[in-house]
Image (tube, helix red, strand yellow):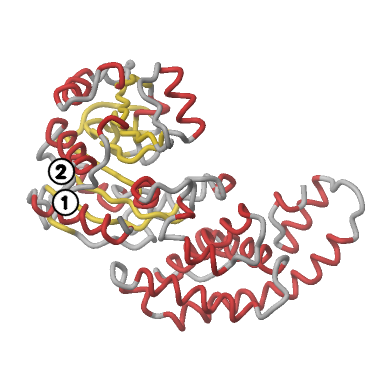
Amino acid sequence: MQSAEIRKRFIAFFEKRDHAIIPSASLVPENDPTVLFNTAGMQPLVPYLMGEAHPQGSKLANAQKCVRTQDIDEVGDKTHDTFFEMLGNWSLGDYFKKDAITWSFEFLTNKDEGLGLDVSRLYVTVFEGDDDAPRDEESADIWKSLGIPEHRIYYKGKEDNWWSPGDNGPCGPDSEMFYDVTEEGLGDLTPEEFNAADDRQDVIEVLNDVFMEYEKKDGKVVGKLEQKNVDTGAGLERLTMVLQKKDSIFDTDLFDYLMEHFSFIEDVRARRIVVDHLRTSIFIIADGVKPGKQDREYVLRRLLRRMFLHVRLNLEGDVKKVFKEAIEKVIENYKEPYPNLTEADAIVMIILEEQKKFESNLNAGLKRFNEFTGSISAKDAFTLFATYGFPFEMVL
């Protein structure tokens, strides 16, 4: 199943269940000055999760553009990226655990309307409870009623099964769904075996139901919200990886054409970094951000320059041509769901202008880098990073 079909199926599934389909918000937050980018599908909806009435009703769904850079050092493994699409459905004081879990299960497993995943490869986690909220036996019972065996339901603490957008705002326990992506199948797992499989990425989180009924202030849960909300999220990249039976998100149709385009970069991790950072930069620029020295502009500059360096170290040919063709391919791939990407020439111009600015620094930096004959000190590494834009992982 292609990624575009997965996206369409999700939207159609919840539209049939009376959810209003809302467009993706910009990556630049409109109602939260504490973050640089929208990092989750629920972030643009915080005022409505806190009780404000949404103009399109109490049941919503969409595919939301997101950017997270806190895991940037993990980019290049099987599942981490900086830009991703979050497929989400929300209840703003409408339905709660039973409908949310039932619909999540149906979307994952139904062959006609959903994704048709194998139920025998599903595992579920729920909140184990603490001083802020009780053990979530209700969610566990719902899962059991849907046919998930009790020994495949794992209770976990706040680190794993509690969601909050930050130190302030709506929050609550969640129930996460994992899928076995191994060839032979893992079968029944003890809690310890499940944790080990998760660490190996033999099981992949494919969907998450957050039950937002609490409020956090200054990092502490202070009480319950006026209404019980549901925030469901499924990362399109990971779902596509599972549905296409690939070993990583970079082998799916969301990335494979870019991986081929940059095939001159032999190191696979470096190539994955390049295609991830390029895709992310294109979406950030399309939402009005330009490279600069502060805040989100600096994040964009870092992504671009990290990408430029990997390409320059592996390419003798025309860098501009390589980037122009790659940018046009990304825009062609996403122009239907995200029409603001149709301004290809403007995005190309901004990226190539930044590449031009970086080129003089790069030449000087490569000369300085090649002067080192032994190990590089932390001070020298910082100089290469701050002055020339060299990523730390390339000089340490």
The CA distance from mark 2 to mark 1 is 8 Å
Name the residue nearer the viewer: 43 or 318. 318
Q: Quadrant of residue 264?
A: bottom right
Q: Is residue 234 above or below residue 330?
A: above
Neighbour tally class for label 2: few under 14, some 14-19, many 20 plus, Cα within 10 Å: many
Q: Nearer the viewer, residue 376 or 265?
A: 265
Q: Secondary structure at mark 2?
A: strand
Neighbourhood count class around disc 1 (C-alpha, 10 Å): few under 14, some 14–19, many 20 upward: many
Q: In the rendered structure, are the residues bearing label 2 and label 1 in contact, judged by CB atoms less than 8 Å apart? A: yes
Q: Amino acid at mark 2?
A: Leu
The answer to whether residue 161 of the structure is visible from this angle is yes
Q: Position of residue 60 (x, y in %)?
A: 16, 51
Answer left or right for 162 relative to 303.
left
- Residue at (80%, 45%) from the top-left corner? 378
Q: Earlier in the sequence, mark 2 or mark 1?
A: 1
The image quadrant that residue 272 belongs to is bottom right
For the residues carrying marks 2 and 1, which lies nearer the camera in this image?
1
Three-letter code, disc 1: Leu
**Numbered circle sitting on residue 92:** 2
| Residue at the image position 36 percent from the left and 24 percent from the top | 187
Residue under circle 1? 60
